[in-house]
Amino acid sequence: MKTLLKNGLKAGIPFGIVSIFLFLIGFNSTIADIILKFIKIDDKTVVFGLTSRPLALLMFMGVIGFWAGTNSGRKIKNKTSSVIILSTLAGLTHGVLVALVSYTIGSLSESGLKINTYLAAMLTQTIKLFLLDKTPLAGAVFMLIFLTIMGALGGLVSFSYDRANTRQKMVSGWKNLTVKINQQPVVRHIQTNPLTRYILYGLILICLIVVPLIAGSYWNYTIGTVGIYVLLGLGLNIIVGMSGLLVLGYVAFFAIGAYTVSLLTAPLPHHLMWNFWWTIPIAMLLAALAGILLGIPVLRMRGDYLAIVTLGFGEIIRILIKSDLLTSFTGGPKGVTAVGGPTLFGRPFSSEIDFVYLIFLAVLFAIFVTVRLQNSRVGRAWEAMREDETVSRAMGIDTLWQKLLAFAIGAALAGLAGVFFASRNQFTGPEDHSLMVSINVLSVVIVGGMGSIPGVIAGAFVLKGLPEILRELENYRVLTFGALLVIMMLVRPEGLIPPSRRKLDTNQDAVLDSKKQDERPE
Amino acid sequence: MAMLEVTNLHTYYGNIHALKGISLTIEQGEIVTLIGANGAGKTTTLRAICGLVKTQGGTIQLESEDLNPYKAHQIVYKGVSMVPEGRGVFARLSVSENLDLGAYSLPDRKTRDADLEKVFTIFPRLKEREKQIAGTLSGGEQQMLAIGRALMAHPRLLLLDEPSMGLSPILVESIFSTVKDINRQGTTILLVEQNAQMALTIADRAYVLESGIIAMQGKGSELLEDPRVIKAYLGGQ
């Protein structure tokens, strides 16, 4: 009984903490709004004296409460009574914690204290919503009972539910299904027919042409942003995915591209007003050059050290741009406005649509470059270098030169992305080039699947496109981003669409690790 | 003209004086072995010859040409190829990709196919596993792959670092007889080994390395009977 009590508390407390945290940052009310967006609840619907928004909130809290119950009941399988006691206890603990906090905050708010001066998200209406538009005491008690019941329910459902077994069943079921589908003669025929490939490419191409035409200017802006991140991702993929150099300051090259086009085409601060098209090769060249210059001193370092050193790159560039020293040259903290855009046959690129096509072209170019590199001598050298640097030197690969090459090519693509970014926004400033950009791009590559072109595209869509679709989560973007990364790394560490080789890796990692044991040097 | 002539070689790892003036010569067509205990400096000597370890004093000459100004990757082009300690195969690449990388220094596609065939006749096992990921090969197969990969570079001097490491006695024997075969076909070999018995049996000449200096040298067969060698390295009385 005592251990049961202990386990119940243990299972409930983390959920209590999470729920309180989500409450304190006001996440619950946002989720309630999103739920209402998907499930239409009539404003006049009243259940237990609750209107639509509190009901939506309860749905979300219910899921967490239920989860707390299932989670606690998972460990015991055979004794129904103890499972239910345990999950009820977990639910109760969860409920008590949430109720205590919400009651305290609710009554403080009721007494006229402005909580949001301490906790920015704790607006009076958010608190009221969490207390289900009731008095603090009634709301808290309601929540307590609700969470306890949900916990107990969760425990009931989780009883005799074997997680590992179910997961395995699902995996093998999925495998069987795909094998069966692949064995169908029709599918086989389509797969082996070389035409299929071209038809597929054709369809993608048609989509690429048609989608921007029907999407509005807002969506085209989003598609453009995704495209820019695909471009950045493909560039970083060459550095991180293909040649295995962990670089955290990738934004530096993006900034160089953006500032090249800005300073050359804008009226201020230099009044150069060059033609946009000329600035593309210049920006790429400058970015590549920067890659080489920054690379020479640091590329002798390996792995983690390289990551830390390159972390500095991005910040140095950003701070230099901002500095008083260079204000007259770069426009300083205020940035550069009225950046020039491209013109084609005398017609300026005014709408988002033009930029979308331009970015598509650039992405196609980047894909072409990547594919060509992958199948070249250089690509093989990178692969070897990523595997074992010392041995690849003993094979005759000039690793320093190869690293510089990867750096230069990756940087040039970032420069290209920077050009489009600045010219599309007609503005660039130092804050466009913060560390967050580097982290985002790296996440695009890792979430998508390191070393895989479709992976990078998928990663950019998930990380840059989805947040636009779920605009309500705007304030919690970083939170959801972090949660997504954690989940991704747990569930699919090789990325969304891993290259075929990486897929092999994760299956064979165990074998490789055991082999590694006897490969340690003296 | 000696194939390789090392004179008074010194290297340091930080403050540790790893090689304290090593001198050795390898004549064209020989198998020379370097034996010694753990940490005696055998691997360091090999790595210094390949340019993977910086030398601090002394010279390394390949057919009278000083190797000092060359970097590791350039030395491969001079005809020196290494089978690294612990095999060092590219674990995530396939067997054929590994072999391909061995020929990195010879960009000519045509000779490569012929070389590949040659390696496959020496190691038929590799042919069977051509498409397999190298990391999933057995230890012996990985060793074969490492040797095959080194041969792909057309070495005149082949450096082998402990090819017997972690292999069963039968495999060790077969690897050593292959090494002997490779030597017969004209490749000069420098073999670093802890398995002194096997190494001395196939070697023309041998050097015994003890904490960074050459303690003994002589013909392989003579050292096999030398009481000091027997006591220290062959486990005998």
Image (cartoon, helix red, strand yellow):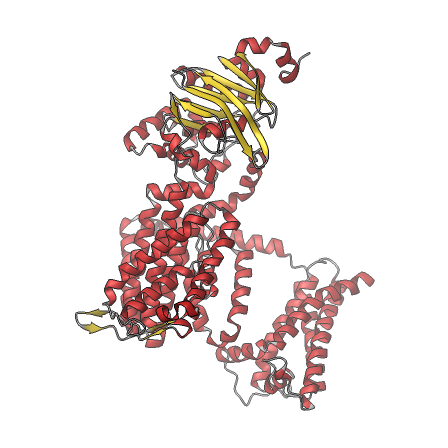
Where is residue B138? Give x, y as percent: 52, 31
Task: Classify the position of the C terminus of chain B by image quarter.
Answer: top right
Q: Residue furthest left?
A: A345
Closer-to-camera residue (A336/A476) = A336
Where is residue B15? Give x, y as percent: 59, 35
Q: Residue furthest front?
A: A325
Number of numbered callouts drawn: 0
Closer-to-camera residue (A431/B119) = A431
Q: Residue at x 65, y 59 (%)?
A: A161
Q: Residue at x 28, y 49 (%)?
A: A194
Q: Is residue A273 left or right of residue A452?
A: left
Above or below — where is A245 with respect to A138? above
Can residue A304 be seen here?
yes
Where is residue A243? Give x, y as percent: 42, 47
Residue A207, quarter of picture: bottom left
Task: Classify the position of the N terminus of chain B by image quarter.
Answer: top left
Above or below — where is A220 with respect to A123? above
Closer-to-camera residue (B177/A41) = B177
Closer-to-camera residue (A301/A272) = A272
Above or below — where is B201 with respect to A420? above
Can residue A465 be seen here?
no
Q: Is residue B144 left or right of residue B18?
A: left
Where is residue A369? Give x, y as percent: 31, 52
Residue A160, quarter of picture: bottom right
